[in-house]
Each structure stands twice: as structure tokens, then as C-alpha cells.
């Protein structure tokens, strides 16, 4: 349970909910639980924890953006 709470807090950013109304809060919580479910599925499939998965996605994103920047520089 502690790991789930930590994952909700850090990976899905539960505390940063921009909700002001009950309906938007319900939608936000539903999407949070959906995101946690997807993270759990990835965790089981790839045998990594949530934080390793997030770090791996972050590194891939940085590499992709860097390659796009190099492409733009070459075209200019």
C-alpha cells in the first residue's frame, strides 16, 4: 500500500490535481487510477518498478528531442 501511495504521489502527481468541482475531481481520480493500472501492467510485463519505467521513458524522450534538434540544425 505504501508503494502505491508513493507511486500515486510521485509518478501520477496526485497532489497537483487542478480540480475545483466534484465532476472534474472524479474524472481526475479515475484517470489517476487508470494510469496506475497501466503502470502496474508495465511493471509486471517488463519486471521493473514504476520509477525505473518512468526514468526509462524520460531518457528515451530526451534522446528523441536531442535527435530532433540535431535534424533541425542539419536542415538549417
Image (spheres, rainbow, N blue to C red):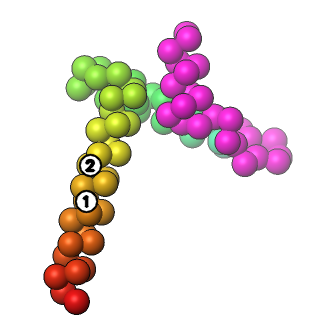
Secondary element at image label 1: helix
The location of residue 20, given as percent across then percent down, is 82, 48
Residue drawn where x is 31% and y is 53% of the image: 61
From the viewer's perspective, is 6 left or right of 41?
A: right
Give the residue pinned by disc 2: 60
From the viewer's perspective, is 67 left or right of 51?
A: left
Cα–Cα gap, marks 1 and 2: 6 Å
Query: Of the numbered discs in the image, which one, if any, rests on residue 7?
Result: none
Residue drawn where x is 50% and y is 15% of the image: 3
Q: Residues within 10 Å of mark 1 (few under 14, many from 20)?
A: few
Q: Are marks 1 and 2 in contact (CB under 8 Å)?
A: yes
The location of residue 76, given as percent across then percent down, is 22, 89
From the viewer's perspective, is 4 left or right of 24?
A: left
Residue drawn where x is 55% and y is 21% of the image: 6
Q: Is residue 61 above or below residue 76?
A: above
Secondary element at image label 2: helix
Residue drawn where x is 58% and y is 19% of the image: 5
**Residue farthest to the left?**
74
Quarter holding residue 63: bottom left
Q: Out of 54 and 30, give the one closest to the viewer.
A: 54
Q: Out of 75 and 35, give the one closest to the viewer.
A: 75
Magenta stretch, overall SS:
helix
**Residue farthest to the top?**
1
Q: Is residue 24 visible?
A: no
Give the residue pinned by disc 1: 64
Q: Residues within 10 Å of mark 2 (few under 14, many from 20)?
A: few
Identify the magenta region: 1-26
Magenta stretch holds residue 72: no
Amino acid at each position: 500500500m505504501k508503494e502505491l501511495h508513493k507511486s500515486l504521489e510521485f509518478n501520477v502527481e496526485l497532489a497537483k490535481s487542478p480540480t475545483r468541482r466534484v465532476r472534474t475531481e472524479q474524472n481526475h481520480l479515475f484517470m489517476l487510477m487508470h494510469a496506475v493500472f497501466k503502470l502496474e501492467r508495465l511493471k509486471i510485463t517488463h519486471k521493473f518498478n514504476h520509477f525505473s519505467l518512468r526514468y526509462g521513458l524520460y531518457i528515451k524522450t530526451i534522446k528523441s528531442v536531442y535527435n530532433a534538434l540535431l535534424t533541425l540544425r542539419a536542415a538549417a
